Image (tube, coloured by chain):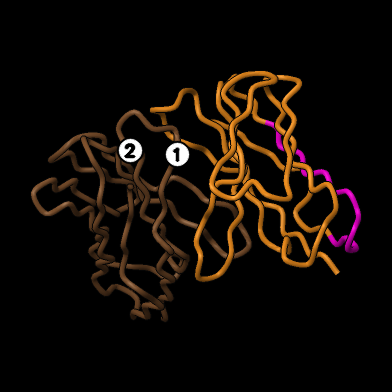
Amino acid sequence: DVKVTQSSRYLVKRTGEKVFLECVQDMDHENMFWYRQDPGLGLRLIYFSYDVKMKEKGDIPEGYSVSREKKERFSLILESASTNQTSMYLCASSLSFRETQYFGPGTRLLVL
Amino acid sequence: GNSVTQMEGPVTLSEEAFLTINCTYTATGYPSLFWYVQYPGEGLQLLLKATKADDKGSNKGFEATYRKETTSFHLEKGSVQVSDSAVYFCALLGAGSYQLTFGKGTKLSVIP
């Protein structure tokens, strides 16, 4: 079974803090994704990566950056957290672009 | 662009009732179609998928058939259980695309 893990299930941060969300997959998948999930808005793609050190913007990249130094790990960075970044963050990975995306358990972030 | 429309929730059913959650899509070419399920406090899990017209995806008693003529992928289950209470997301992966497009989700509550 594919396993996608995220470093924290719940996180509380202050406005202006730098926040790191980590995601690790154990299936040698090429592609990794970061989404945020908000009530009434569904899931929206923030960034994705198709190889080590390669990244592409999704629909809502503003206020976020990402890092992929190793194939199995994809980090989402909030450079200066703001209250409107309070959300559920979901990481996913897939073997290739045409393959199923497998999701982690999510990180619920609260920015005060 | 691609889009997914699924029925608004919440849906409340009694145990052993028949379930249908409607999903229609707009896409060019031949997308792959998915149903994901999200249990309370958890990430998304793949429930079933279909990659070409007339394919039927099935898992855990759930079924959905890829109908190109009606651009639909309705989710059905003959007899729901309390443990099926969750949010269900319909999604598509466009032909030649990396990006999953999600519906807004349908919350299902099954009461004993």
**How far from the left and from the top, in percent, is residue A45?**
55, 46
Asked if badges 2 and 1 are on one and the same chain, I answer yes
Q: Which subunit holds the residue at mark 1?
A: B
**How far from the left and from the top, in percent, is residue A73?**
72, 28
Q: Residue at x 24, y 60 (%)?
A: B76
Q: Residue at x 68, y 49 (%)?
A: A62
Q: Name the foreground residue: B44 vs A53.
A: A53
**How far from the left and from the top, in percent, is residue B92?**
34, 45
Instruction: Estimate how packed mark 2 is, as few (under 14), some (14 to 19) or many (20 or more) residues with alpha carbons within 10 Å.
Output: many
Q: Residue at x 23, y 64 (%)?
A: B78
Give the distance between the C-alpha atoms of the residues marked 2 and 1, in whole angstroms: 7 Å
Which residue is identified by label 1? B99
* Residue A63 appears left or right of B69: right
Q: Amino acid at mark 2?
A: Gly
Q: Check contact, mark 2 vs mark 1: CB within 8 A.
A: yes
Q: Name the foreground residue: B9 vs B27.
A: B27
Q: Which mark is residue B94?
A: 2
Q: Secondary structure at mark 1?
A: loop
Query: Quick one: label 2 or label 1, which is nearer the N terminus?
Result: 2
Q: Which subunit holds the residue at mark 2?
A: B
The magenta segment: A12-24
**How far from the left and from the top, in percent, is residue A25?**
65, 30
* Residue B61 appears left or right of A98: left
Q: Which mark is residue B11?
A: none
Chain in brown, by letter, is B
Q: Quadrant of residue A16?
A: bottom right
Q: Name the foreground residue: B17 vs A63.
A: A63
Q: Secondary structure at mark 2?
A: loop
